[in-house]
Amino acid sequence: MTTTADALALGLSRDQALAAYTTVCRARALDDRRFLLNRAGAIAFIISPRGHEVAQAAAIAALQPGRDRFCLYYRDFAAALACGFTSAELMLSAFARADDPSSGGRQTPGNFGSRRRGVIIGSSTVGPQIPKAAGIGLGLKWKGEGALCYVSFGEGATSQGDFHEGLNFAAIHSCPVVFFCENNHWAISVPQPLQVAGAGVAARAAAYGIPGVVVAGDDFFAVYRAVAEAARRARAGDGPSLIEAQVLRLQSHSTDDDQRSYRDPGELAAEAEHDPIPVFQHQLEELGWLSEAEDRRIRAALEEEIDSATALAEAAPDPDPSTLSRHVYADG
Ligand SMILES: Cc1ncc(C[n+]2csc(CCOP(=O)(O)OP(=O)(O)O)c2C)c(N)n1
């Protein structure tokens, strides 16, 4: 775990760290509410970021939303919030309302898209955002503005051809891309040893001649440091990097899955004791940047925010049925 002295040496301000902490708590509060709404039958299936939030917020904190491009994946709710999505927008998407900024209620929630925030919408298939990010990286290199493309995915995606094609292409053309694997060791019910051959995800970077690092996904400052270094390399023209953040999947794959049917109960109980949010909270307390009172204030404000986001989304109109085939078939 990063020491207080090392955390201070990163040059992050208290405001930046507290903003990231608030994002992490916002993602969790939103997730709790979406889970209740799903169980009440008000919204369709959801995928939870629970256990990934700290790693996601740390990665985006080391980048430049508004300048960089982001190819996120379906578990990236804290990353999307860190890129500027609001709770209300993500709730509109959960309710599949017409005002959902990503797709007007057409795509599964978790397909994040926002042109003005540089967030490029994906699809629900596993992996295609990876070669897409390599191509975007090449475009950014040609533009020469010093921007980079960040792309995230699970370890299951690294057994897709898309992963290898994307890394190979980005390495050959020295594209400014940060490949960020959120390794929760499970691809739905398939454990890592049946999904990823060899020494792990980061080790695969060597095949493409790029740096590959493993980092503890519950250590905000360690993830920040790794992504900041990858971003520095990308902006300097030194090409892509691969980061493997080791995280826990504290929920089932989705609300349509029950991991108790295929995971060891002892392992699940042990993981439940290692929620990354209290770890981050403790790091901030050690730095003297967060008090218990401040933490209570942040969480109470978020409860109110999620209440009004839910009310707004519940009352918002559905997409117009006459537009059903828009973006599916060519007009006319
Ligand atoms: C090409 C493709 N194959 C299979 C699926 C079904 N599927 C959806 S999510 C998922 C697991 C992916 O696991 P991982 O990449 O480790 O990410 P995680 O969900 O664990 O964060 C699978 C197999 C899919 N959507 N697309």
Image (spheres, grey):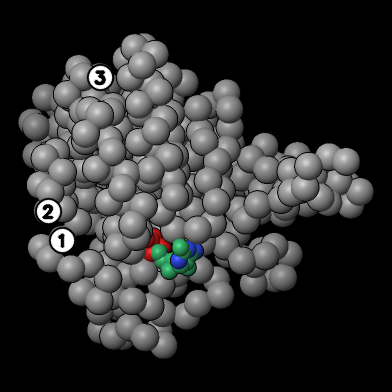
Residue 189 to residue 59: above or below: below
Residue at x 28%, y 85% (from the top left corner): 264
Which residue ends up furthest to the right in the rendered image?
Answer: 322
* Relative to 174, residue 304 above or below: below
SS class, disc 3: helix
Amino acid type at mark 2:
Ala
The location of residue 136, given as percent across then percent down, is: 41, 30
Q: Report whether 309 appears left or right of 291.
A: right
Number of the label disc, if any, that sits on residue 235: 3
Q: Which mark is residue 200?
A: 1
Q: Gap in Å between the C-alphas at discs 1 and 3?
A: 27 Å
Instruction: Tell me, for residue 203, which label it has, or none.
Output: 2
- Check if mark 1's residue and mark 2's residue have beta carbons within 8 Å: yes
Are circles 2 and 3 on residues that touch, CB within 8 Å? no
Q: Is residue 243 visible?
A: yes
Q: 73 or 90, which lies in front?
A: 73
